[in-house]
Image (tube, grey):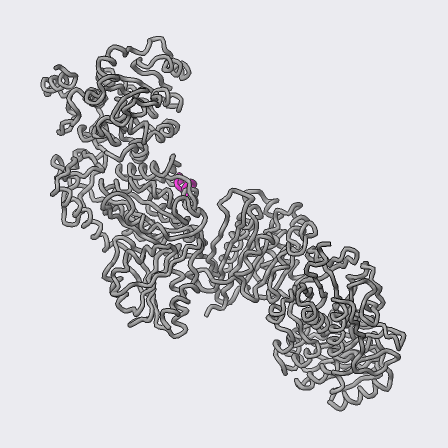
Amino acid sequence: MVRAMAERHFVVIGNGPAGNRAARTLREKAPGDRVTVVSKARQSCYSPHRLPDFIAGRITEEKVLVCPYEAYRDERIKLRCSQEAVSVDLERGQVVLGHKEVVPYDGLIIAVGGRPFVPERLAPFGDVVLTLKTLEDAKAWIERLEQVDSVLLVGGDLTSFSVARALIHLGKKVHFLLDGDAFWPLRADDELLATVADSLSGMGVDVISDGELKGIAALAGGGYEVQVGDWTVQPGMIGAFCGLVPDVGFLARSGLRIDRGILVDEYLNTGFPGVFATGDCAQIYHPELRDYWVSVGYENALALGRTAALNLPCGEEREMAEPESVFEVKGVSLDTSWWKGF
Amino acid sequence: MKTPGRILAEKVAGAGASGRFSVRSGNLPIWCPGCGYYGIHQGINDAIRRLGLPHHEVVTVSGIGCAGRYPFFADTYGLHTVHGRALPVSTGVKLANPKLTVFAVGGDGDGLAIGGGHLPHICRRDVNVNYILFDNSIYGLTKGQPSPSSPTGFRTKTSPAGTTEAPLNPTLMVLSYGATFVARLFAGDPEGITAALVEGIGHEGFSFFHVYSSCVTFDKEFKTWANLNRRIHPVPRDLDRGDRKAAIGHVLDDDFSMGVIYRA
Amino acid sequence: MRAIDLTVEICGMSGDGTIAAGALLNAAMAKTGLSVMAFDTYPAEIRGFGRCVTRSRIGDESMVALADRTQVLISLDDEQSRSRIPFLEPDATVFLDSRPPALVAEGQSLAAHVEPENSLIGVPFGDLSSQVAGSKRSKNIVALGAFAGAFGVPPEAFREVITVKFRSKGGKVVDVNVQCFDAGYRYVHENHPDRVTGLLSPKEGAGTGDRQLLSGSVAISRGALDAGVKRYFGYPITPATPIMEYLARALPERGGAVVQMEDEISSIGAVLGSFYAGTRAMTATSGPGFALMTELITHGVMAEIPAVIVNAQRGGPSTGLPTKTEQSDLQAAVFGGPGDSARIVLAPTDVCECYRYTAGSFRLAEKYQTPVIVLTDFFLNNRVETVTLAPAAEQEIADGNVYPDESKKGGYRRYEITESGISPRSVPGQEGFTYSATGLEHAETGLPDYTPENHMSMSEKRQRKIAGALRDLPAPEEFGDDGPLDVGVVAWGSTFGSALEAVLRARAEGMKAGTLKIVTLFPYHADRIRSFMARCRRVLIPELNMDGQLANLVGHLNSEEVIRLNRVTGVPLSPREIYEKIRELGG
């Protein structure tokens, strides 16, 4: 086959920390091949864990962008921003983009990450509740924060703690409705929640740990009145932090095995040759745990991105995906490398 | 020798008081003695006089060649343009001021060769210009080269072996271009020219006057006075002058009939 | 600094409605009170064979040149639009059809080629058009809606110009197109809310939009109409044809006539005939046609007959580049034709000047009994600007004819030698003043005369006459710093605007720079040009020709060699190119 000797085309879907690291690793390991990154986001790769600092005004937008556009050009990585993969044809080896362009691949890494999870209880109030995933989200927060003095945070995932710190830094009054669902798809145990509540209180956050959200009403003069259990708070704005749900809806008919995320083996392979999933969108088998684990956190994402890329081009040298810094929550590994400093 | 030019000169001398030459300017024509253009000149003058056209409301536009000099010899407004362009310039004059009577004059080289491209268009536009084609079938001013109406085999200094091209038939051409008034005339018959001009000037639209003339200096064998005089004859009386098809048929058959051939 | 300075390109295949969309965009932006300068490029082929690009610079202040880079690209054909990517600003916004009719292979979408910094806005142009209008034909209108939505242009402005454009096709067509616009507008708000900016929303104190959006061709036509032109004789040729098209509608309404002649020779011939008979007439052409006219133009010089000729230059020589701009007919305009044939040559530099100097050329032609050539170019004729035309001044358009005194009746000498060189000219219909005009050298009477003394004195008279016209001709204008200059740019025609913008940029960076605008190319104001050049350490003459034709004409007025910047790329010289040359010379 003529194709055998030809330049190969590796496609990475997603340009978060995992996708970015995967692409750069591919370039490093396969210098003669073509690497394309397809990214739904408008901007280049940015680090979500720096968004709270960006909101706090501690770093500029440039610092949030971890990989400038020049780096992609220098490394001959074709970056397609604002372009969404809408389906993957595993049989033909093609990714179809939203604007109907068909991109063939010889190897594929899916690193689409997740989108903020809004639990059912909060869904009725979806239009007044802000989430934080993208740079655009962060800008919306900054804009809204200019007009308010107090904020109610609901949930309690890893990002929310940094946000709480950022808001205190900005001099805002922070109410925190701490919630066991916060670590979706994981569930925090009471001990962990108590520790977290202590830390938050210590920072000056008003922690509400035993209430149930009953209703939200918009006030005439701006802001909201929120009923939590027997309490009433009147925050200027509300943010929800309940973890991420893998953004893999577009793969529903692809034939990939999907549970909450894309199920992959310990080498991040989907079971289809040359097709890998990594980062927040992957559910990874752990041979020792004999169960799937889900990566959380920036450092883990980088490591997983690299692992997928190392395993893809040659398929000989196989590297195992290992959580880097782990603690157990109900039998699932959770990385805490970046929030330990909190 | 009594050339027609000399005869004409004698007539001029004897007719000063008659007013026959009132349309002439003070400048004597520079044409060769015996040239047919004197007769055409007289024919035009008489037409202007007979119609009583004020001289300052007449414009004579010409190109280049022996005939091109004509405006200098007429007491009208004159416009001696460049080679071949009398028709478009006269179009501009007539459209600028429709009250003017406009003549375009020029020779066969000027009107059929370099300026030949303008002829169909003034016909189809039907601009009210009176175009008098002085056709002696030769370039006279440049001393005798063949023109588009010269006969095949015509020998000149630039065609020492004789021309190989076929001659154009201007009367036939304008009939096919859709000209609305077509006459064929003879320089040796100034009265015939005047009569046709009087009719043609009155015609609202483009009028074409194809005048056979002789170049006494450079053509000794073809359109000589003797040859022309022997061959010309009036257009048959029974020709329907309103029938373009009949006119074309007639012209195809007869090269030497003189008079008004077609009038729309 | 301008708060708004946005260059928008629409690119498509001929047949996509690109040019129409550009025209609507320009009109709508003008309606909102913003300034517009726009220029389209399109293929020479009739239909279906080439790329169309409209380029509109939109600003809150009037502008003198097109911008170097593009901030917004609207793609109606991705393959064609690829060629525009190199001209995009790094953070440019790119609109494309996000739902082409069928799947396309990798690389066939514009999305495969844009830089990642570009802001990509996908809008289903074709699908929305099909849903609303039943065909994809209105996808260009959908695209305009998307643009308006993203940049905050008030939709009313577009709805109004769309209504005007489609009115003649009936209310239903208007409605459908307005709905297509609205669909694009809504789509962006609903699907790309993060891209919506208010950049072009109306600002406090913005203009009322009462300025006209005119092309150079229309301005030329209006100038001629306001000067009372009665006859237009012409032959179709790119890029002059729009003048004939405009006048073909407007002139009959004013009792005039347009005649399409059989060629350019007959066109100028008829113009001369008309002026000879006392009626204002004009023709417009481009290089190849102008070449055909030169013999008769010199006839006008010799016989002293007025004429007005617009030469809208295009790329040459020969048929050259019919749809590309160039300034390579200067020498032909000034010197073209047999003999010493001085005539007046004016080169407007912008749309307003196209109007003013065309209007003024009729009186000049009459007064100085000579052909006047208005030298423009493809860029100037085809670009549109938002302008406020001050009506032509009465004294600039008044009858310029000098008629003979009744007392001269009988002994009228048409070409009487006078101090000014101007001899009273009669027109047919005037009793007692018949004469024959001729292209032969002639005596005062008009009769041919080839004697040495006569040819000398008549040549001097004609030259004197043209030199004397200087006092009535627009003088060079200086812009920029007073006093000694590091670099002075002498510019003409449509290149002047770029020169001015380049000089302003150089001055903003602390350089001593200035520019001299030369409108009157012949005769020329030697003293004024010399005094400007004397202030300059270096004199730069940028031109869209290889020869350096203005440099050849006036370069000798400088004490040392002038610096030439010559480009023949078919596109206008950009301010940046001139600016970089200024920097290089001034450093």
Q: Quadrant of the N terminus of chain A?
A: bottom right
Residue in front for this viewpoint, C14 or C174 = C14
Asked if residue A142 lies in the magenta stretch, the reply is no
- Residue A288's x, y, as percent? 88, 77
On the picture, is B46 further left or further right than A202? left
Q: Quadrant of the C terminus of chain A?
A: bottom right
Give the dominant element type of the magenta stretch: helix, strand or loop.
Answer: helix
What is the number of callouts on the image? 0
- The front one of C282 and A4 is A4
Who is closer to the viewer here, C520 or C335?
C335
Observer-nearest of B77 and C525: C525
x and y percentages locating residue C195 in the rendered image? 62, 65
Which residue shows up at 65% across the image and 59% down it? C122
Residue C516 seen in render: yes
Magenta residues span: C246-253
Q: Which image quarter: residue C78?
A: bottom right
Q: Residue C58: x percent and y percent?
A: 49, 61
Left or right, B51 with reference to C317 = left
Q: Is residue C50 above or below residue C70?
A: above
Residue C352 at least partly seen: no
Against B32, residue C46 (above or below) is: below
Residue A68 position within the rendered picture, expressed as x and y whole percent measured from the top left: 61, 73
Residue A225, quarter of the rendered image: bottom right
Q: Is residue C280 above or below residue A320?
A: above
Q: Residue at x 52, y 66 (%)?
A: C203
Q: Is residue A251 left or right of residue C283?
A: right
> Among all residues in the image, which is located at the extreme bottom?
A202
